[in-house]
């Protein structure tokens, strides 16, 4: 019940204040003049009087969290990978995650910055996956497309801002080229 009265009082005060501010916009009235000050103050006093008391919360002391100790025979995949000896197969395994990371960085940047224009063709941008529109651009080479993307070209604004590196832009360009190839 108290909450309903409080809400009604606050809304009433808000509506009165809004009405007063709108009426102050009328001709011949200085915008700093406030009308019916008594009514606004009365509504504010009523809202304060009907407001619920602040509650003090007491939280019980909690015991520290106990971390279960693992048996020495238990290992994780990370432990196994760190303990594995370095051999000729290790560089090949390391290259695959790096490629996935590059694709992910390109896709993330595309979704964050490039999609707005390249998904719809806004500002004559070649649409994502449209081989016919991308063909002449791809012929210019990845370096040129990366430079145009980073620094801006024709209607395309520069994309190298707010910490976005040219390498990230190159990965996004390669991501779009792969979709159109």
Image (cartoon, grey):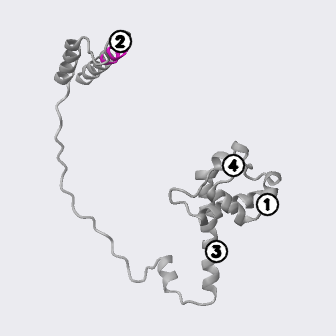
Residue shown at the point (74%, 60%) measured from the top left: 177
Mark with earlier residue (3, 4): 3
**Element type at mark 1:** loop
**Element type at mark 2:** helix
| Label 1 sits on residue | 181
Count the marks.
4
With respect to residue 68, does 163 lie above or below?
A: above
Determine if the magenta segment contains residue 125: no
Q: Nearer the viewer, mark 2 or mark 1?
A: 2
With respect to residue 108, does 47 lie above or below?
A: above
Determine if the magenta segment contains residue 21: yes
Structural crowding at the residue carrying mark 3, measured as other residues with C-alpha within 10 Å and reported as few (<14), some (14–19) or many (≥20): few
Give the CA distance from mark 3 to mark 4: 28 Å
- What x and y, as percent, mark residue 106? 63, 61
Mark with earlier residue (2, 1): 2
**Element type at mark 4:** helix
Q: Nearer the viewer, mark 2 or mark 3?
A: 2
- What x and y, as percent, mark residue 145? 71, 60
Q: Which residues are magenta?
A: 17-25
Q: Is residue 171 left or right of residue 128?
A: left
Mark with earlier residue (4, 2): 2
Residue shown at the point (19%, 22%) measured from the top left: 50
Q: Is residue 157 left or right of residue 52?
A: right
Q: Nearer the viewer, mark 1 or mark 3?
A: 1
């Amino acid at each position: 019940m108290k909450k309903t009265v409080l809400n009604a009082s606050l809304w009433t005060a808000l509506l009165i204040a809004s009405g007063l501010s709108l009426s102050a916009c009328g001709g011949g009235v200085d915008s700093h003049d406030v009308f019916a000050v008594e009514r606004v103050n009365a509504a504010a006093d009523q809202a304060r009087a009907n407001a619920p008391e602040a509650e003090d919360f007491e939280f019980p002391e909690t015991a520290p969290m106990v971390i279960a100790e693992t048996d020495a025979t238990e290992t994780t995949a990370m432990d196994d990978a760190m303990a594995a000896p370095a051999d000729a197969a290790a560089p090949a395994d390391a290259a695959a995650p790096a490629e996935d990371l590059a694709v992910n960085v390109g896709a993330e940047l595309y979704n964050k910055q490039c999609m707005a224009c390249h998904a719809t063709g806004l500002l004559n941008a070649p649409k994502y996956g449209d081989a016919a529109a991308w063909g002449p651009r791809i012929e210019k080479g990845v370096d040129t497309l990366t430079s145009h993307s980073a620094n801006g070209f024709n209607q395309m604004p520069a994309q190298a801002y707010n910490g976005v590196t040219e390498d990230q832009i190159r990965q996004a360009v390669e991501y779009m080229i792969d979709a159109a190839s």
